[in-house]
Amino acid sequence: MDTLVRPDTYEIAALSAECGVDAVKYSREKGKPAFALTRPPGHHAGPDYGMGFCYFNNISIAAEHLLNTGDQSIAIVDFDVHHGNGTEDVFGNRADVLYISTHQAGIFPGTGSVDFLGNDDGKGFTINIPLPSGCGDSTFHSAYSKVITPIVRQFRPDAILVSFGVDGHYRDPLASLSLSSNGHLAMAKELLLLSKECGNRITFFLEGGYDVPALSEVVAATVGEFIGVEVPLEFTDITDKHCLGRSAVERCSKNASEYWSL
């Protein structure tokens, strides 16, 4: 009931997916970051189903396009507050796509266990970091420094794709993580820095975000970061100063260290 279908739904959702494909093509051709303002979003849509406001999995379609046109490996980093169950379902048994998700534990869609690291050939190429309510800037800094950055660097992708959700923001009404606008921008900066190791090939895909002022300033600041325009941020309160989610990050690191040097 949260993913209604109208006569024009297919066309609109297809345009959103096409937007993502155009963005990754631009990033590859120009050697520059890109931001796909994909609406509807996509990371809850699986190979044969839609759910959670998602009809087609925009980021997965774009990743498949790149793999079908010459690339060998793609890293997808998902920091939407909800787990990208659809993306995990698409690539969970494959080694050519690394999928890493940070998300709030215990909320919709109920997937994303820290103990799931992929199936078959994909073992070790799915990394889930479910975080307790209240986690914010310092926890995400720890997750990136201890898990995400070193794994992406070891994977050596041809391109990085980002499921860019702003619903982990402390202003967002649908969940209860506590990221500030600065915290979101810090993740974007870290991924932009990582993308220098793959020819500046990084594309951000808009996923969730239900507080429009917070969503707006975070997206604008991220785009500003890679076009050289500084955007002032208003929503900068930090409540998680002492790594509230330390144990969750450490558990993920322990599991992932079976496959990666951490």
Image (cartoon, helix red, strand yellow):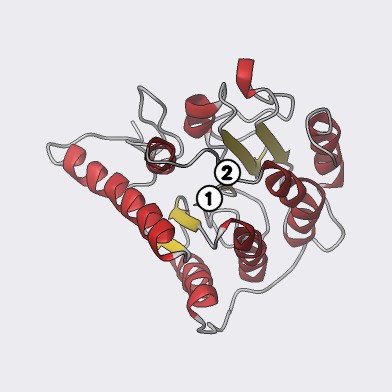
In depth, the one of 132 and 63 nearer the eye is 63
Left or right: 15 in relation to 106: left
Disc 1, disc 2: CB below 8 Å?
Answer: yes
In depth, the one of 183 and 92 nearer the eye is 92
Residue positioned 60% across, 37% down in the render: 98
Q: Which quarter of the rendered picture does the N terminus lie within?
A: top left
Quarter where residue 23 is shown: bottom left
Residue 95, percent across and down? 60, 28
Q: Amino acid at mark 2?
A: Ala
- Is the residue 40 above or below the residue 96 in the image? below
Left or right: 18 in relation to 185: left
The mark found on residue 159 in the picture is 1
* SS for callout 1: strand
Residue positioned 39% across, 43% down in the render: 62
* SS for callout 2: strand
Tell me the distance, in whole angstroms, between the alpha carbons under discs 1 and 2. Answer: 6 Å
Identify the residue position indicated by label 2 in the image: 75
Residue positioned 50% across, 77% down in the render: 224
Label 2: few (<14), some (14–19) or many (≥20) C-alpha neighbours in 10 Å? many
Residue 22, percent across and down? 31, 54
Query: What is the residue that sits farthest to the front in this orientation?
Result: 70
Q: Amino acid at mark 1?
A: Ala
- Is the residue 222 above or below the residue 144 in the image? below
